[in-house]
Image: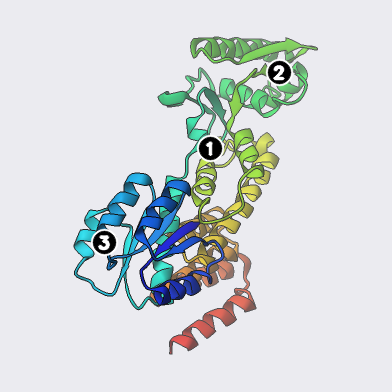
Amino acid sequence: MKVLLVDDESLALRSMEKLLSKHGDIEIAASLMDPRQALVFAVEQKLDAIFLDLEMPEIGGMELAARLSTVQPDVNIIFVTAFDQYAVDAFELNALDYILKPISESRLGKTLNRVRKALAEASPDVDAQETGTMLCCFQSLHWIHGAAGVQSFSWRTNKTQELLSILLHHRNGPALHKEVLLDMLWHEQDPARAGVQLHTTIYQIRKMLKEQELAVQVVYEHEGYRLQLDQMRVDVEVWEAGLLKSPELSVAELGAHKRLLDMYKGDYFGESQYVWAESERERLRLLRWTYLQRFADFCLEQELLQEAGEAYQQMKEQFPLAEDGYFGLMQVYHKRGNFAEMKQQYAMLRNRLQEDLDIPPSKAIINWYNESFGQRA
């Protein structure tokens, strides 16, 4: 996060520099005493935030803020002053925050979190800008078409849905031999009738894909069938590629990471729970869990408590017998001073482990919990 400091008092600038130096993601682009220099600097340098003193000679803080907003409309302005009578005027200028001197570390921390959140929300969504069609396997088999959004298939039978799901599951491999498909879907029927069922279902899939005008073909080769997608994207592939190229976890990139997490709409073919998809379903679940835990722990460390709480809650829902989600929520509530909720999360963890596994929580969590209540006392 690149910030500019503007104050006509050198001691105030040094004090702010010292406070900000304790935050590793802050880059102080300049500390200026002259408002006119600040205007020139803002023209030359892209800034994320400006800490601006209100009481300055020649160009007052309000006027300077208005000029800076013209130069950089998206910059986050934080007013710093020893007087509180300007608060209403400050927020009328769409200032992000208003801090009274002398500035405490805790108050500055809250302001920086507000800036980080604003930057994360303003981060461009690259995936949302992409056009075209995407087949989706998360939660259920459906497709998304540009601005039209989520589209559903019109299934003639459950076998039609499952056969297309199987072909999509094996999209990167060779054609599935028809005997394999017959054994997977119609093993209980005599071979002649099962063969007719397969041909009929393939016909229904091809007709449906044509009616939906999807650039997807069911190709017959080597006595089997495969799905030809051409340039069609698949959500699980887009999601995994996004994980691999995702930026390093930082507050400035929080929005990009949240969008990746939001792409996971549900487990792989989770609505149908196909047995043949179980291995891939568990692999993706663990991949999401690992990524979600890193995200949650980072947010907790940065005291982005709402984001951390939401992520830990998702962890708890996905793996209700894992301690991590409960413990994360306990730490969130502890930081908020909500000891009743912290106690409830601990009780839920203890009861769940006792009922399902006949074990207590780990010693580390028990010790942390007891120490936390000891500190409270």
Cα distance between the residues tagged 3 and 1: 56 Å
Which of the marked residues, 3 or 2, is nearer the chain's N terminus? 3
Relative placement, left or right, of 272 versus 228 is left
- Residue 308 position, x and y percent, is 49, 60
Q: Residues within 10 Å of mark 1 (few under 14, many from 20)?
A: some
Q: Residues within 10 Å of mark 3 (few under 14, many from 20)?
A: some
Relative placement, left or right, of 9 versus 317 is left
- Residue 94 position, x and y percent, is 28, 53
Above or below: residue 171 compared with residue 329: above
Q: Amino acid at mark 3?
A: Gly
Q: Amino acid at mark 1?
A: Gln
Where residue 226 is drawn, which disc sits there?
Answer: 2
- Residue 370 position, x and y percent, is 53, 84
For label 1, the residue is 139
Say if mark 3 contacts mark 2, CB within 8 Å.
no
Relative placement, left or right, of 310 versus 327 is left
Quarter of the image where one finds residue 65: bottom left
Above or below: residue 164 compared with residue 308: above
- Residue 228 position, x and y percent, is 67, 17
What secondary structure is found at the residue carrying circle 1?
loop
Instruction: Residue at 53%, 33% (x, y): give it.
Output: 140
For label 3, the residue is 60
